[in-house]
Image (cartoon, rainbow, N blue to C red):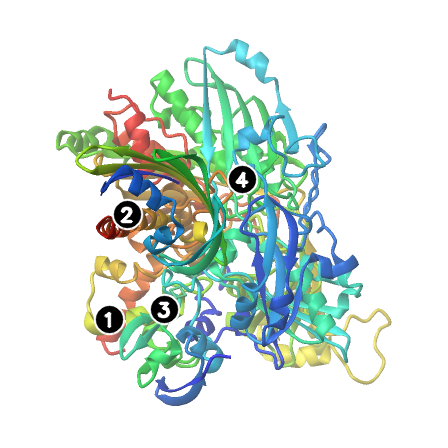
Amino acid sequence: MAQLIKIKVTVNDTVYEREVEPRLLLSDFIRHELGLFGTHVGCEHGMCGACTILFDGEPVRSCLIFAVQANGHEIKTVESLGTPEHLHPLQEAFNEKHGLQCGFCTPGILMTVVPFLEENPHPSEDEIREAIDGNICRCTGYEKIIESVQAASEKMSSGK
Amino acid sequence: MTGKYFGQPVLRLEDKHLLTGRAKFCDDIVIPGMLHAAFLRSDYAHAIIKNIDVTEARKHPGVVAVYTAEDMGDYWKLGPLQVPPPFAIKGAQFNARTLPPIAKGKVRFSGEPIAVVIAESRYIAEDACEDIIFDAEPLPAVIDLEKAWEDTSVLVHDDLPSNMAALVKQESGDYEAAKKQADVVVSHRYVADHVAGAAMENRGFVVNWDERTQEMTVWAGTQAPLPLRSAIAGRMGLVENQVRVITPYIGGGFGPKVMTSQADDVLLPWISMKLNRPIKWIEDRRENFLATTSERDQVHHCEMALKNDGTILGFKDIFYHNTGAYDPYGMTVPLNTQTHTVSNYRVPNFYTEIRMVFTNEMVVTPVRGAGRSEGVFVMERMMDLAARELKMDPVEIRLKNLLKKEEFPLNTGVIGQDFVVGVLDSGDYKNNLEKCIQMIDYEKFRNEIQPKARKEGKHLGIGVVTFTEGTAVGPYEGARVTVGNNGKVSVATGYSTQGQGHFTVFAQIVAEQLNVKVEDVRVITGDTGHFHWGAGTFASRGATIAGSAINSAAVLVREKIFATAAKLLDVPEDQVELCEGSVCVKGHPEKSVSLGDLAGKANPMRGAVEADVKPGLEATAYYAPPHGATGSGACAMIVDVDPETCKVNIERFVLVHDCGTVINPLLLEGQIQGGVSMGIGNAFYEKMVYDENGQLMTASFMDYLMPQATDMPKRMEIGHNVHPSPLNTLGLKGVGEAGALPPPPAFCQAVEDALYEYDLDLTESNLNPSLLYKFKNEATKR
Amino acid sequence: MNVEGEYIFNGPQQAVYEMFNDPTALATAVPGMQKMVQVDETHYEGAIFLRIGPISAAFEGVLSLTDVNPPESCTLNIEGKGKAGFAKGVGRVKFTDIGNNQTKLNYSGEVNIGGTLASVGQRMIDSVAKSMIKSGCEKLQKTLEERCQQK
Ligand code: FES
Ligand code: FES
């Protein structure tokens, strides 16, 4: 057995201290060590975007990072947004515009869009298209995802 | 047909859980004591196994067990024929060679499993796979379909005289006679290449054998929970109610997840029982490409006989279909091709021949489109070829030959995947096309936009095609609808769901019948513990087949509600009506009983009841169609091609479709748009490439290009036609695959039109910039 | 996959040829080569560690020489196998004295790959092979210079 390394990571405002193998992927750590299953794994090599999380506020692919690299850092996953009872406006918009089907790609897309809308609260359709270009969705054909993000930007800027 | 819920754009009930990361997918299942499996797979596409040495792997710390075919004893058996061939077709030949759960003696495709490691973690299991020494003697691989058919080819199964998996000839009318009457005959060879289903969630399987209760629970990302349950029970010598298959949330299906009796579901239940431990296996993306089934891969030799005015007299199509190394899924895909080659045009004489061949590639089973795509592709390309030969407009020749709505129901004379002669039930194919060209402003494009663009040196082209989608085939589906004591309704069906929105549309059907709120209907899909009859999710049959069964069950429950309430309220049955969540006496809303209370009354706990009691407000119903319902449509796109780089932009995209009655227009759009993205992916991005040694060169998203947001047209303009199917009460037809069918031929036609200076002849359904470039360079300049 | 190319060595043909038949010289020239031992006259066994795109893995294999025609040409046959797949290659090398104490190497060959190497690494393998050959030849040139000096 490889030696274990002690790490301290803040995930969704909770501090976790764990001992992990150096080769453990951050995506596996989030899912299987912390039980936060909302972060999905679609390819394990950085191509699909399903595993996107916020790492110190930046969207990154958690399948390309080792858990040990997250030591001392702050992570946000989809579980940090809304709950089924109180959806985040972005999640509401996805529901209203039918921006998801199987929902497997969705957490990664939401976590890509959250910082995007923070930086660019009134994006154009093209800008949205570019922003989600690295996230693969097999179900929707993207049009309704783009509509969802547009609707979310309106909701969020009108403070609803 | 619209009601309070039925036909309305009801927002999806399942979204809340999916959006917040709370929905439970297969890899989210955790059972105490759970072990993890990893498969070692063959690097060779074709080889004789000499030795598999697992000694070191077994010693690896954390490894619990390692199995090869040798270790399985009598439990090792070839898999079942999941779909039998249709014996109704006279003279059809079929050689069944079903899937070995794990290779024994020989490997026949690269990625075929040769050993399984069970360990305390997936990381350890994968490490231990590397400790296994696999010694094999490579053989030449069979890859080229047409060469594989020849007598001189290397054999995939050396106990067969050739690589022929099937030979099926069907004819309606007399093609050769028709050809003699023809003014022109055009012929051509077309290729529809291999593509992957590539659901974003890979396959997964979790099994737990409970020795104390003698019950096995399986969670699997399957499109066919009941066939899976029966297969596992049969193999394990268990009675069906000892095995419960649960489908958790599934991250897309698109066809390949309908397969059962593969390494995971054969080996892991057996190992779980042996070790008395739960086991999880989650496929990774490379495994998915290598060893999960995929589709297309046909080579067609087509011939069309016509009159000078463009009237089709006959069509002949001999095509090679790659079934891969084995053929457990029978002939579903090529039969679909046969039925879809001529199902929208009047083709009085049609000869079609399937030459299904074994190759050293992964098994071919349906992927969204499922043989229809290939049929639509070759027919539409042949229409273009004929138009060119006759100097006709591509739209004109289509309008001339499209079936008229008065001709339905029309017997096609060709037996399809549901083993019965096809019958086109309804629709207005011509109107689909007319609406489509109107939406895309065909005349204006031809007369104004295109000439102007050409003057400016721009290469704009238009493509217009039509299609049909055979959907909603049998055998049957069923459902049980129950009103609970809290007044809420539960629906259980054996049908499984992968993101299509069934939780919502099924709820809409029931809510409409029982006048309850949609969110008060809880739908359970694909859990054999809740409902244990059904065939599975395939052929765009959910809304129609399962939906019709659910509707019937709901109607029965409504009748029961009326009967029970009338008795309780002491009025004749025709005097009660459904108010929201209750039953009341007509004209006397104060005289009412809530559905919850009524459910309690329908299930008395003491006293005497009638001898033929059917307790509760509950009913079960099944629906079995005589044959499939056929959806139809037309599609047009305008492309802008850069002749230098061969980059193609889709400037406009229009699709008109007819899937009969619409249950939820919002979800319908989602289905079509998703299908379109797959069709566009097929047309210009996706392609699985095997080299001549049978190595899959595209086993990651780096090489297998999935359509991304910027690859899609800005807007998918969708037009609707509604011709309810006469086959079921609700008038439904399927639509799941419609969007995927027309993009490849429309794309080819549009690109040819755009590069008008070249005599371009696009014969492949899966282009990409470099392939297009090659075609362009081979074309002569006009 | 096919590879083809040429390289000009500064040294006499005989010396270049000998170097190509010397396992130790070859072993140091191939990037990632971990060992190379002679089994008999024309067979060598070796181990190599390769990095190709997302794959990095060890391979073990046999190198054999056929059609030996000193000092003009020979054929190198490689068969390697590892956790990440397998590779099989034949390379024909030809040496020509182009005067000026220079020797031209012409090589052409084909490589078949399988396993992860093929399914994930094939896009990169072309450029990896080219860069390996290039840096290999450069190393050999150094060895050649050293050898010539020693003489
Ligand atoms: S799983 Fe991380 S990008 Fe696909
Ligand atoms: S919703 Fe299924 S992959 Fe995006």
Q: Which mark is residue C137?
A: 2
Q: Which residue is mark 3?
A: A64
A76 in relation to C22, above or below: below
The location of residue B731, given as percent across then percent down, is 56, 48
Chain letter of disc 2 in the image: C
Q: Is mark 3 within 8 Å of ligand 1?
A: yes
Mark 3 residue type: Leu
Please tell me whether mark 2 sits on a helix, a strand or a loop.
helix
In this rendered view, identify the residue nearer to me: B240 or C51: C51
Looking at the rendered structure, whether the residues under marks 3 and 1 are on a common chain is answered as: yes
Mark 2 residue type: Cys
In this rendered view, identify the residue nearer to me: B305 or A25: A25
Q: Which residue is mark 1?
A: A117
Q: What residue is drawn where x is 72% and y is 50%?
A: B78
**Image label count:** 4
Q: Which residue is mark 4?
A: B371
In space, the residues marked 2 and 4 are separated at their CA atoms by: 52 Å
Q: Quadrant of residue B413?
A: top right
- Between tags 1 and 2, which lies in front? 2
Please tell me whether mark 4 sits on a helix, a strand or a loop.
loop
Chain letter of disc 4 in the image: B
Q: Are marks 1 and 2 in contact (CB under 8 Å)?
A: no
